[in-house]
Amino acid sequence: MEKREQLYAGKAKSIFGTDDPDHVIMLFRNDTSAFDGKRVEQLDRKGMVNNKFNAFIMTKLQEAGIPTHFVKQLSDTESLVKTMKMIPVECVVRNLAAGSLVRRLGVQEGLELNPPTFELFLKNDALGDPMVNEYHVQSFGWATAEQLARMKELTFKINAVLKDLFAAGNMLLVDFKVEFGIHKGEVILGDEFSPDGCRLWDKDTREKLDKDRFRQNLGNVVESYELVGQRLGLTF
């Protein structure tokens, strides 16, 4: 498959066209950003680690019956994915209180949420990715009621699969965000799943193993990502 022009460059990934209109190439870069892109740094090996981690997780989700855009890993930093129209809304599930939930509601970090919460955020860095509700999503035409219901259903299925997967590696899936798009009329999981977009804690010590290490200047960001992968059986 022929790699062609760059179609899009996000904060940590770039998308390239191919000679097949149904597929594009997703490049994972070493860029690491926080606070809606206000802080950006280069972390050696991060693109490679996230690409391999994402390929592993997407494969596990597909095996569990969750449709995704992932096709195959092409190289250390590139993967082949399906062309899709992205829905500009992030779906967030929280199993434990952390991050913005703690700041917004003044609850204690680590509080177990039963049932897990489901939240929606508009993907818009200029506005700070504001929280929205289902009425906003439908009223502004970002997704239909049927698409939104499917997104919610799939997000909770992802949570069920990954909570067990990370638990087997003695980790807690605190929260995560996922994004969806439309491919040939079907809602499917897009973007990526890596420690960039979720919170993972060691089950015993509650040490943070995710992007909070970058946000909070804890150090060893990529090393922690690799540790998460190794606990799941990955090698880098």
Image (cartoon, grey):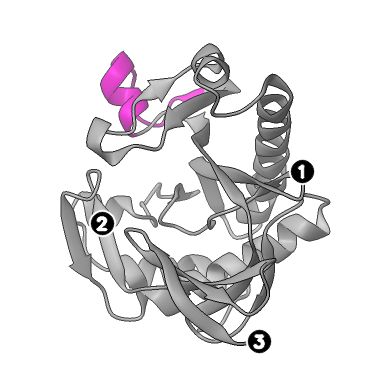
| Residue at which label 1 appears | 185
| Residue at which label 2 appears | 33
Tell me the residue at 66%/57% (across/down). Answer: 168
Specify few, some or many for label 2: CA neighbours under 10 Å numbering under 14, 14-19, or 20 or more: some
Look at the numbered disc 3 and give the secondary structure of its residue. loop
Is residue 232 visible from the viewing direction of this image?
A: no
Q: Give whichever of 26, 57 is nearer the camera.
A: 26
| Residue at which label 3 appears | 1
Q: Earlier in the sequence, mark 2 or mark 3?
A: 3
Tell me the residue at 60%/54% (across/down). Answer: 166
Look at the numbered disc 2 and give the secondary structure of its residue. strand
> Three-letter amino acid code at disc 1?
Gly
Q: Give whichever of 12, 8 is nearer the camera.
A: 8
- 25 left or right of 43 in image: right
Specify few, some or many for label 1: CA neighbours under 10 Å numbering under 14, 14-19, or 20 or more: few
Looking at the image, residue 164 lies above or below residue 24: above
What segment carries the magenta color?
99-112
Where residue 78 appears, x then y in whole percent? 52, 79
Do the residues bearing badges 3 and 1 touch, measured as CB atoms within 8 Å?
no
